Image (tube, rainbow, N blue to C red):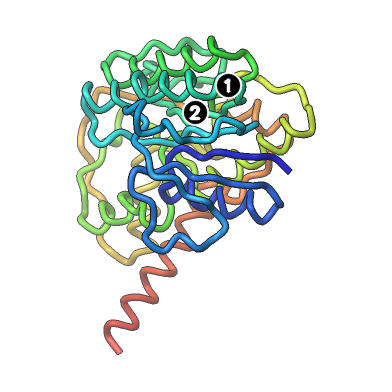
Amino acid sequence: MAKILIVGCGAIGSELGRVLSAQGHQVTGLKRKPPLSASGPINYVAADISSVADMSDLDTEFTQAFFILSPDGRNEQSYRAVYQTGLNNLLAKLPKTQWLMVSSTSVYGQTLGEWVDEDSVAEPANITSRLLRQAEQTLIDSNPANIVVRFSGIYGPGREYLLRQALQTPAIQQNPTYFTNRIHQQDCVGVLSFLLEQRLAEKTLAQCYLASDDDPAPTWDVMTWLADRLHCPPPTAKAGVGMNKRCSNALLKALGYEFHYPSYKDGYLELITHYHEQRHCRHK
């Protein structure tokens, strides 16, 4: 049994906490505003990581910790508060703890449709992605045993942007091909718990893993497929200039992880079924 801290308990962090608790681990969740009725398997602590004083009473005996925070906004100030001030405060508070940090494939600046993996150059152009990349390096520099996990576009219940977009007959870039990379939020939880399991089993692990499903696909194909299953008009084609990148999960799969949702078709079929069920209930 490990004593585990989860910093950031949104949909992914709270579900991860439930999974790890069910495995017998002792789980503490750090959140600015914990649930009012926190009677479940996670022991919540209220704290803002940007404030050293806020964390003064935080236990320091955690052997493992997860950093799964999202900034309040997509701006430089919000990113610095989380990925500079907050992260540095945590590393100073818990110098002996081993960390798993959730990052993003936005740290890759490639835009020509090329494949990227953990060894690809990660030099993003925008300031928020650069701050995220710097946070990755800060984490690894603090302890080479720490691990960064780069998630691609997360979808699932409550994260249904593409579904809503498909219902609006959007104009989608068809040529040149613009790729989209995704991971279902259940696989986000699965990847994080899997990597912890491998670490506790003392397996040799890399410092970085790219976590994206098996099927990076053209956005045009994804939206056309969604429209067909939703029984709504297909998207209209528009010209474009960018191509984006394709994310490889080969390293993660070589370690032994098996995706619950290897393709967008697997994951979105469930969301579409739920959508049709809701519509049926409203019209009864």
In the rendered view, tell whether residue 23 sits above or below residue 108.
below
Q: Amino acid at mark 1?
A: Cys
Residue at 37% x, 16% y: name it: 109
Residue at 37% x, 55% y: name it: 226
Q: Measured from the top left, where is residue 201 in percent x and y? A: 79, 33
Q: Measured from the top left, where is residue 166 in percent x and y? A: 28, 54
Residue at 34% x, 20% y: name it: 85
SS state under label 2: strand
Residue under circle 2?
150
Which is nearer the eye, 91 or 10? 91
Q: Measured from the top left, where is residue 227 in percent x and y? A: 33, 58
Packing grade of label 1 (10 A; few <14, some 14-19, many >=20) is many
Where's the C terminus, which quadrant? bottom left
Q: Is residue 203 left or right of residue 43?
A: right
Which is nearer the eye, 70 or 36? 36
Q: Are the two marked residues, 1 and 2, in contact with CB atoms closer than 8 angstroms?
A: yes
Specify the label residue 208 is tagged with: 1
How far apart are the two marked residues, 1 and 2, measured between alpha carbons? 8 Å
Mark toward the start of the polypeptide (1 vs 2) = 2
Q: Which of the 4 quarters of the picture holds residue 36?
A: bottom left
Q: Amino acid at mark 2?
A: Arg
Q: Is residue 145 left or right of residue 69?
A: right
Q: Is residue 53 left or right of residue 141?
A: left
SS state under label 1: strand
Q: Residue furthest bottom?
A: 284
Residue at 35% x, 14% y: name it: 124
Specify the label residue 243 is tagged with: none
Packing grade of label 2 (10 A; few <14, some 14-19, many >=20) is many
